[in-house]
Image (cartoon, rainbow, N blue to C red):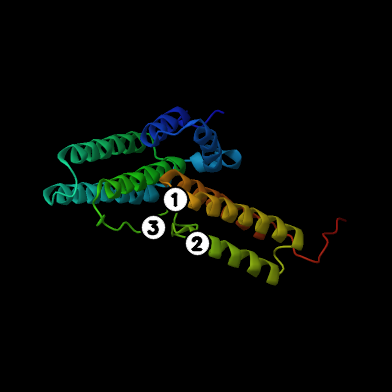
Amino acid sequence: MFLKRSKQTLILGSILSLLSINCAQANDLTNLLQSWVGNGYSNFNNLSSGHQISTINNIQNRIGQLRSDANVAVQNGQITHNEFINMNAELDRINNISANYAANGMTFGEAQALIGMLDTAATRLTNYGYGNVSHFPGYNPRPGNYGFANINERQAFIQRRIDQGVRNGRLNQFEANSLRAQLNRIARDEANMRLGGLSGWERQNLLSRLDNLNTRVSNELNDGQIAGRRDRWF
């Protein structure tokens, strides 16, 4: 697969090295990348200049939060000095990746990957024994879609859009059933993932799939077709 700026290798290497993914998970990661890419590679288009700035600022703020948390944790004896060093080394790595992406124009897929890495770093700090990791509000690099990153909120939002589309006639029954089926598949996958504990990259997989589905809903709502009316050609 050829991406717009050949970032697939870098993203794969970054995520695989962070998560130590086994072969089965690596196959799933291919699906994750595909969910980011979508039709026409639209998810790898550069973020707008405004979204670039807000995304980079959010990522830098989160890195700063986690550094502060690690410092408090080591001072309180809740994590060891080696764990403190490992945590800061991981944050340095994420910061370097972020700087590299920003220098070339950060894409949506890259931003989602960084958010997943930071989620995983926060989980690592919790696993080390620090139970007071700072809160990081749900952040979507493309706030024009719906502006929140909570999975359940996104699912409910998309379900409401489909229901409203049926009521106002902008979605026919075939379109609605197809969209609902895709939403249900994502919900089933989420339930299965949560059985073993939802990892950072699994969460980003679900969020990206929901983002793509929301775009598909928008396309169906705006295709000019009205339920119950046949277009006539003269």
Closer to the chain start, of discs 1 and 2, is 2
Name which residue lies at 53% across and 53% down.
Answer: 190
Residue 176 position, x and y percent, is: 70, 61
The residue singled out by tag 2 in the image is 152
Q: Taking 233 as reference, is 100 above or below it?
A: above
Q: Amino acid at mark 3?
A: Gly
User: Residue 166 appears in which quarter of the rendering?
Assistant: bottom right
For mark 1, give the secondary structure: loop
Q: Amino acid at mark 2?
A: Asn
In front of the other: 159 or 43: 159
In front of the other: 213 or 19: 19
CA distance separating discs 1 and 3: 19 Å
CA distance separating discs 3 and 2: 12 Å
Contact between marks 3 and 2 (CB within 8 A): the answer is: no
Contact between marks 1 and 3 (CB within 8 A): the answer is: no
Closer to the chain start, of discs 3 and 2, is 3
Contact between marks 1 and 2 (CB within 8 A): the answer is: no
CA distance separating discs 1 and 2: 16 Å
Residue 85 position, x and y percent, is: 19, 37
The residue singled out by tag 3 in the image is 138
User: Residue 35 appears in which quarter of the rendering?
Assistant: top right
Residue 197 circle label: 1
Closer to the chain start, of discs 1 and 3, is 3
For mark 3, give the secondary structure: loop
Sort mark 1 into few (<14), some (14-19) or many (20+) by Cα contacts within 10 Å.
few
Nearest to the eye among marks 1 and 2: give it: 1
